[in-house]
Image (spheres, rainbow, N blue to C red):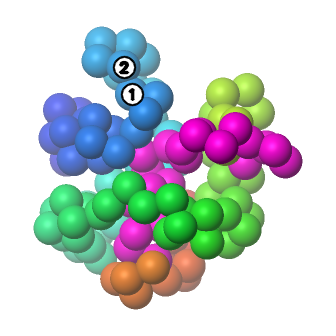
């Protein structure tokens, strides 16, 4: 997947932190995992396009995605407040997290799929 397709499919629609033209070479670990799952044929673009921004879904996945994904993400230390002990009420996770939470919730992937591409 090229950079523009990746941004159009994962970052731009789901990530509140995405800013056009800034740090375009950077992506959260969740987005990179989603990209790898697409490249491996484990999911297809329709699965990603169907993801919804649903707070109850991403809140329900805070523990499991926090352990397998967020702890390994380069943004966790300085840029991610979502996994902090007391995040702001209106704070969203990164776009990759939102997509992966949706895929897990709908049983399109499981934790082993994520771990296999990390």
- Where disc 2 sits, the SS reads loop
Give percent across and percent down for residue 69. Answer: 62, 58
Q: Residue at x 40, y 39 (%)?
A: 15
Q: Which residues are magenta?
A: 83-104
Residue at the spot of label 2: 19
Q: Are marks 1 and 2 in contact (CB under 8 Å)?
A: yes
Question: For this view, does 74 lie left or right of residue 9?
Answer: right
Is residue 80 positioned above or below 30 on the image? above
Question: For this view, does 87 lie left or right of residue 3?
Answer: right
Q: Residue at x 32, y 61 (%)?
A: 52
Task: State the residue in front, 91 or 61.
Answer: 91
Is residue 69 positioned above or below 86 on the image? below
Give percent across and percent down for residue 53. Answer: 38, 55
Badge 1 density bin: few <14, some 14–19, many ≥20, Cα 10 Å: some
Question: Which residue extends farthest right?
Answer: 85
Q: Quadrant of residue 105?
A: bottom left
Residue 79 in sight from this viewpoint: yes
Q: Which mark is residue 18?
A: 1
Question: For this view, does 21 lie left or right of residue 96?
Answer: left
Task: State the residue in front, 28 or 13.
Answer: 13
Quadrant where the C terminus is found in the figure: bottom right
Residue 117 in sight from this viewpoint: no
Tell me, yes or no, whether the highlighted magenta stretch contains residue 87: yes
Give percent across and percent down for residue 5. Answer: 16, 41
């Amino acid at each position: 997947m090229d950079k523009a397709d990746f941004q159009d499919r994962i970052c731009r629609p789901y990530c509140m932190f995405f800013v056009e033209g800034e740090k375009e070479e950077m992506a959260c670990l969740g987005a990179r995992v989603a990209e790898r799952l697409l490249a491996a044929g484990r999911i297809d673009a329709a699965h990603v396009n169907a993801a919804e921004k649903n707070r109850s879904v991403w809140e329900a996945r805070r523990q499991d995605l926090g352990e397998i994904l967020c702890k390994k993400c380069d943004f966790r230390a300085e840029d991610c407040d979502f996994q902090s002990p007391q995040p702001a009420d209106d704070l969203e996770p990164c776009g990759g997290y939102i997509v992966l939470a949706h895929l897990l919730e709908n049983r399109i992937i499981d934790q082993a799929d994520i771990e296999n591409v990390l």
